[in-house]
Image: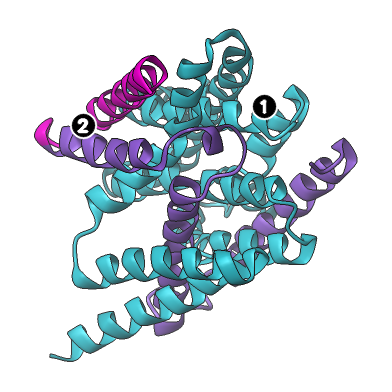
Chain colours: A purple, B cyan
Amino acid sequence: MPSSTELWIGVLLCAAATYAWRGLGVLLSGRLNPGSALFQWVSCVAYALVAGLIARIIVMPSGLLSQTALADRLLTCVVALLAYRLARRNMFAGLLAGVVFFVGAGALRAQFF
Amino acid sequence: MSPGFRTGAREAFGVPAAVLGAGFIGYGSLAQDAGYSVWLTLTASVAIWALPGQLVLLEMQGSDAALVATLLAVSLSAARFLPMTLTLIPLLRQTHPRPPVLHLLFAAQLISMTTWAVSMRRFNDLDVSQRRSYFMGFSAVCIGVAAVCALVGQLLIGALPPLARYGLALLTPLYFFVTLVGEARDRSAFAALACGAVFALLFQLWMPDWSLLAAGFIGGSIAWWIQRHALKH
């Protein structure tokens, strides 16, 4: 695991890297077209990157979640999505159903396997 | 306190702050698991102020990825802030006299997916002179709630029994999963999701430090191509 100093350096550099886009946006506003093909590509790339991140955390997690079962994590995603849709796009219904299912599945596993 | 600030603050309390709060409770618990101190969690939440980037950083620090790869991945996940700022800032600038550029540079730090989406919609029926204070009020509540929730998550995870701890750790990934898959509308979005997921997992086995960047570039480019192709027909 990285040291405390390394963790701090990571956070501060990432804050600077994130701010660079924000600051650039202020300085270039009015001079760049936000609807251009380049920006459409940029948002597609950021979107796919986050999708990759979530897939990675759910399928091959590190840390705490690596002690849980892959089948439980995958089924939890299905349950949360169904609850979200059934409750007419209510995020809380989705999260609640997912977490309750996940903890319940873990408890059953601990009991019977 | 100006009326705009109060309106913004009032509108942030409710669904926007609650959804954001759920994401940040989970983030706090993951930060604790990754060895963050309370101060580092707070600093990351306020200074980066982009939950996807914060999560990319945690995940890559947790797997001991090279700093360059981590920075590139976080930076790429934050690139959407450029077009977002480009569209929001002109709407804050139409006042007379024009606001000093320092104010705008500060406002840019407060932009997040939530504050941007709500402000872009609300600015239509807000007086130009009220926009900046509305944005400030809305953002102040969002950032405050997020910071408190991150702390709660971080302190809570140590106090919970192991099984509940797993539930808390899954909260933020689940939140993003439901948002991404539940809100995907067209073929291009589904292509980005599917390609991003598949390439992240493939590259994870082969060169883990670069898996997220590869997922973004390949998945994003395919989705972009589909989007442009669909537009032509």
Q: In the rendered structure, which amino acid carries the disc numbered 2? A: Asn
Q: Where residue A86 appears, x then y in whole percent? A: 10, 34
Name the residue located 50 percent from the left edge and 76 percent from the top edge. Answer: B217
Q: Toward which corner of the image does residue B150 lie, by quadrant?
A: top right
Q: Is A37 inside the magenta-drawn segment?
A: no
Q: What element carries label 2?
A: loop
- Front tag of 1 and 2: 1
Q: Where residue B131 appears, x then y in whole percent? A: 43, 42
Name the residue located 64 percent from the left edge and 70 percent from the top edge. Answer: B207
Q: Toward which corner of the image does residue B14 lie, by quadrant?
A: top left
Q: Look at the picture and state if B126 lies above or below B53.
A: above
Left or right: A99 with respect to B144? Answer: left
Which subunit holds the residue at mark 2? A
- Residue at image mark 2: A90
Magenta extent: A86-113
- Residue at image mark 1: B32
Q: Toward which corner of the image does residue A67 lie, by quadrant?
A: top right
Between residue B162 and residue B217, name the one nearer to us: B162
Q: Report the predominant secondary structure element of the magenta stretch.
A: helix
